[in-house]
Image (cartoon, helix red, strand yellow):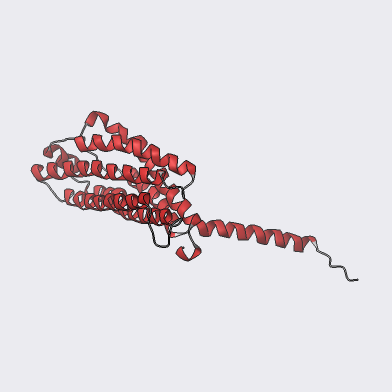
């Protein structure tokens, strides 16, 4: 009888191989399109908030807006690109991914009611965000107080409309059993906080502007979590 001997080196190689395979699997799950987009969404926002760009107060008159933004055009444009332009694409990708994830348990190609709401509200928020980016770039080129006031107020009010659309997105995700429980709870928290924040921005209530802080934190956690979790559950062909 021939006995096969496993040397320590061979055993270590097998263990290392399994560990490497597991690590590679995790990296692949994180590097799906939704996963990368979800992480990129938060990174873009964080980078945008770090840009030293002036931010006039709610309801500021045109002359004050022009004076605050004078000489800061590149910084303001960069901030709008990082907080409105790139995130617009991120919202669109995540909303489509959520709609697809919600449709998997049913018939092939079917999208559930929460999935439809997520798709419509997410795409609406993405369009509004892209429009805000365009208005923000135009604002950096305006020196007349009247148009500057109109543009600045429009960006703020559109922010309110976008937040209400994102509230619907969060509430829709909360109804999706395909998502983990913690992420559904995050969607509920997002829907509540960002609704309050959206009303503040729609009505330009300067004294309550700080309400956007908790909503933003939950939004970043929600978008990143959705991207990663949907990517981990995606069919390998979708990756």
Q: Residue at x 84, y 65 (%)?
A: 5
Q: Quadrant of residue 155?
A: top left
Point out the residue furthest to the front here: 107
The residue furthest top is 207
Rendered image quadrant of residue 51:
top left
Q: How many marks?
A: 0
Write down the quadrant of residue 50 in the picture.
Answer: top left
Q: Is residue 192 left or right of residue 105?
A: left
Q: Is residue 6 left or right of residue 225?
A: right
Where 19 sits versus 160, above or below? below
Residue 56 location, x and y as percent?
A: 21, 37
From this viewpoint, is residue 37 visible?
no
205 displayed left or right of 142: right
Where residue 42 appears, as percent x and y from the top left, is: 39, 47
Q: Position of residue 62 (x, y in %)?
A: 12, 39
Q: Is residue 164 visible?
A: yes
Residue pictured at 13% horizontal, 36% vertical: 61
Residue at image position (41%, 56%) is 103
- Residue that lies at the very extreme toward the bottom in this rendered image: 1
In depth, the one of 81 and 19 nearer the eye is 19
Residue 222, relative to residue 208: is it above or below? below
The residue depicted at 26 percent of the width and 49 percent of the height is 80
Q: What percent of the width, then of the height, locates residue 67?
A: 15, 40
Residue furthest out toward the right:
1
Which quarter shows the N terminus? bottom right
149 lies left or right of 6: left
């Amino acid at each position: 009888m021939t006995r096969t001997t496993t040397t320590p080196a061979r055993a270590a190689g097998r263990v290392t191989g399994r560990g490497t395979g597991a690590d590679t699997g995790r990296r692949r799950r994180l590097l799906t399109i939704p996963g990368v987009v979800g992480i990129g969404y938060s990174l873009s926002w964080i980078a945008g908030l770090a840009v030293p760009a002036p931010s006039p107060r709610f309801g500021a008159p045109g002359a004050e807006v022009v004076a605050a933004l004078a000489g800061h055009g590149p910084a303001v444009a960069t901030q709008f690109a990082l907080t409105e332009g790139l995130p617009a694409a991120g919202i669109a990708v995540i909303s489509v991914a959520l709609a697809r994830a919600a449709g998997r348990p049913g018939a092939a190609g079917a999208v559930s009611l929460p999935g439809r709401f997520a798709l419509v509200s997410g795409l609406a928020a993405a369009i509004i965000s892209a429009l805000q980016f365009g208005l923000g770039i135009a604002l950096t080129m305006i020196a007349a107080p009247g148009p500057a006031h109109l543009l600045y107020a429009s960006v703020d009010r559109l922010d309110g409309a976008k937040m209400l659309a994102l509230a619907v997105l969060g509430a829709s995700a909360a109804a999706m059993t395909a998502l983990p429980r913690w992420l559904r709870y995050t969607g509920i928290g997002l829907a509540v906080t960002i609704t309050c924040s959206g009303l503040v921005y729609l009505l330009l209530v300067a004294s309550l502007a700080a309400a956007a802080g908790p909503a933003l934190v939950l939004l970043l956690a929600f978008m990143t979590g959705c991207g990663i979790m949907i990517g981990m559950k995606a069919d390998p062909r979708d990756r």
